[in-house]
Amino acid sequence: TCHIPDVIEAPYRPAMLHENSEGIPIRLGGPSCLAGDIIGDYRLPETPHIGQRIAFLDQAHYSMVKTNTFNGVPLPSIWLWNSDTDDLKCVKKFDWTTFRDRLS
């Protein structure tokens, strides 16, 4: 939720690509130590696996201006996805130096 703070503040549940009302129920959480770091409950066609890409829809409106580095979690990388070819292109990647530089 460092990257989608509205999940806790609003509360808000972002729509997910390939959600399926008849699918397998999952609960998706974030990587921080915050007890409520839960993005939401979803139903997917199959059980997700490590490394699988999960895409939230309609997240550009506040996702970059409200992100933070809570507990050192890096800011989200910015990617462009071509839905016709399924190609991904990294536009911007943040790392520990971004966290450090924001402290001063």
Image (cartoon, rainbow, N blue to C red):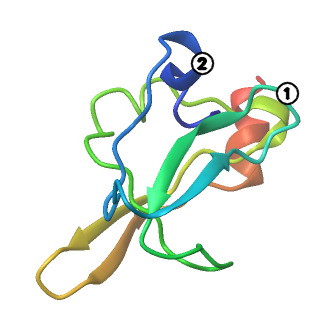
* Residue pointed to by mark 1: 35
Mark 1 surroundings within 10 Å by alpha-carbon count, few (fewer than 14), some (14 through 19), many (20 or more):
few
Q: Nearer the viewer, residue 84 or 48?
A: 48
- Considering the image in quadrants, where does the N terminus appear? top right
Relative depth, front residue between 34 and 102: 34
Residue found at the very far front of the displayed protein: 22
Q: Secondary structure at mark 2?
A: helix
User: Toward the viewer: 78 or 19?
Assistant: 19
Residue drawn at the location 31% of the way across and 60% of the way down: 17
Q: Residues under labels 2 and 1: Cα distance?
A: 11 Å
Q: Is residue 48 left or right of residue 38?
A: left
| Farthest-out residue, left | 84
- Do callouts 2 and 1 mark residues in contact (Cβ within 8 Å)? no
Residue type at the position of mark 2: Ile
Q: Which residue is mark 2?
A: 8
In the rendering, at what x and y percent does residue 5 appear? Answer: 55, 24
